[in-house]
Image (cartoon, rainbow, N blue to C red):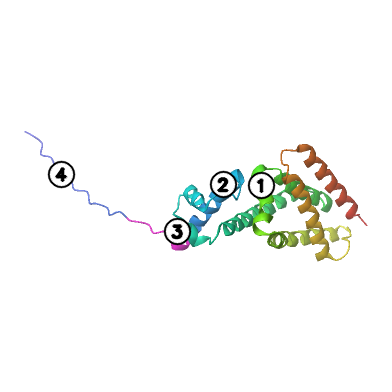
Amino acid sequence: MPTRRTTVKVPTVPTVKVRVPQAQRSARTRAALLSAARSLFADQGFAQTGREEIAERAGVTRGALYHHFDSKAAVMLGVVEQLEAELVDRVVRAAEGGEGFGEQLSLGCRAYMDACADPSVARLLVEAPVVLGPDVCRALDAASCVPLLLEVFDRAGGENVAVPGRREVAARLLLGLLNEAATLIATAPENSERREAVTETVDAFLSKLFAVT
């Protein structure tokens, strides 16, 4: 006797489309644009990169680019702000490996100068003042680095290490020294001899400047 087959109907589950919040989509688009611009600026330079090329590399429309950045210089500003944050994080992580104020300061400064020898970083550091102007770059450096140096000076006081002059002024002068060292390295990132000479000289300056009392 043949077996009767029973057909079971499986209910169709409707497809649910997850809507990504506008703020999240906007943040993703901005991040993609900055990543694309950073890569292009580092590889071929600011002047040789067009806004349309940035949009194409990021996989977005030109309208999306214009919505987030009203000029190519504004894109560079965003890239430099991102780079500043990464450099600060790199310096802090390196300094954490030191046992005392002197070693922490030396490790942090070396990490900064080593980063400047990376060609993808070096070109951005060299072109940023030309594109944005030196005043803007100094302001960005001061905003991200001076508070960090003041924290280091607080640690120095706890170890009876004298900070010469007024702390805020000393922080800006030390930042100027480090930025000049970074420029010397960034203008010839492949020159390991220069990098070592600059790094050794900065170490010598720091050891003379911050004498243990």
> Label 4 is placed on what type of residue?
Thr
Q: Amino acid at mark 2?
A: Leu
- What amino acid is at disc 1? Arg
Give the residue type that dot 3 points to.
Answer: Gly
Q: Are marks 1 and 3 in contact (CB under 8 Å)?
A: no
Q: Position of residue 59 (x, y in %)?
A: 45, 49
**Residue 8 among magenta residues:** no
Q: Is residue 46 left or right of residue 143?
A: left
Measured in 3D between alpha carbons, the distance from the residue under mark 4 to the one under mark 1, in whole angstroms, is 69 Å
Of label 4 and label 3, which has the lower sequence position?
Answer: 4
- On whether residue 25 falls in the magenta region, the answer is yes
Snapshot quadrant of residue 80: bottom right
Q: Which mark is residue 40?
A: 2
Residue, disc 4: 7
- Foreground mark, 4 or 3, reads 3
Q: Which residues are magenta?
A: 16-26
Callout 4 crowding tier (Cα within 10 Å): few <14, some 14–19, many ≥20: few
- Compute the Cα span from label 4 to label 3: 53 Å
N-terminal of the two: label 2 or label 1?
2
